[in-house]
Image: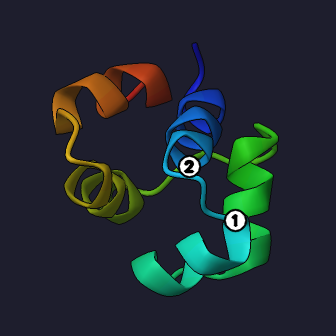
Amino acid sequence: MSFGSKLRLLRKSKKIGIRELSKKLDYDRSYLSKIENNTVSASDELIKAAAKFFRVSEEELRISAGKF
């Protein structure tokens, strides 16, 4: 599963919209949308922030992003 798909799945499991997630993680909504649609790669900082916010393994997210 790609990082974008994983991010979308985590976000939907918490029942939050992309706008709310962008505010919580302090990232632009359009950037997160591009990541979820696998148009751009996630930054290391976003991977760390998402792991912390969703309380999942950073290593697991890095592997899905192809950054291991």
Residue 52 higher or lower than 25, as above or below: above
Discs 2, 1 touching: Cβ within 8 Å: yes
Residue 42 rendering spot, x and y as whole percentages: 52, 50
Q: Quickly name the residue at label 2.
A: 11
Q: Quickly name the residue at label 1.
A: 17
Give me the residue at 36% from left, 55% from top: 50
Residue 26 higher or lower than 44, as above or below: below
Residue 29 higher or lower than 65, as above or below: below
Q: Which mark is residue 35?
A: none
Q: Earlier in the sequence, mark 2 or mark 1?
A: 2
Give me the residue at 70% from left, 66% from top: 18
Relative side of 66 to 57, left or right: right
Give me the residue at 53% from left, 39% from top: 13
Residue 54 rendering spot, x and y as whole percentages: 31, 50
Image quadrant in which the N terminus is located: top right
Instruction: Say which quarter of the image contains residue 60.
Output: top left
| Secondary structure of the residue carrying numbered label 1 | loop
Relative side of 33 to 8, left or right: right
Mark-to-mark CA distance, 2 and 1:
7 Å
Residue 5 rendering spot, x and y as whole percentages: 65, 29
Furthest-front residue in this view:
15
Q: Amino acid at mark 1?
A: Gly
Residue 39 higher or lower than 68, as above or below: below
Give me the residue at 44% from left, 80% from top: 24
| Secondary structure of the residue carrying numbered label 2 | helix
Q: 33 or 62: which is nearer to us?
A: 33
Relative side of 6 to 56, left or right: right
Q: Amino acid at mark 2?
A: Arg
Image quadrant in which the C terminus is located: top left
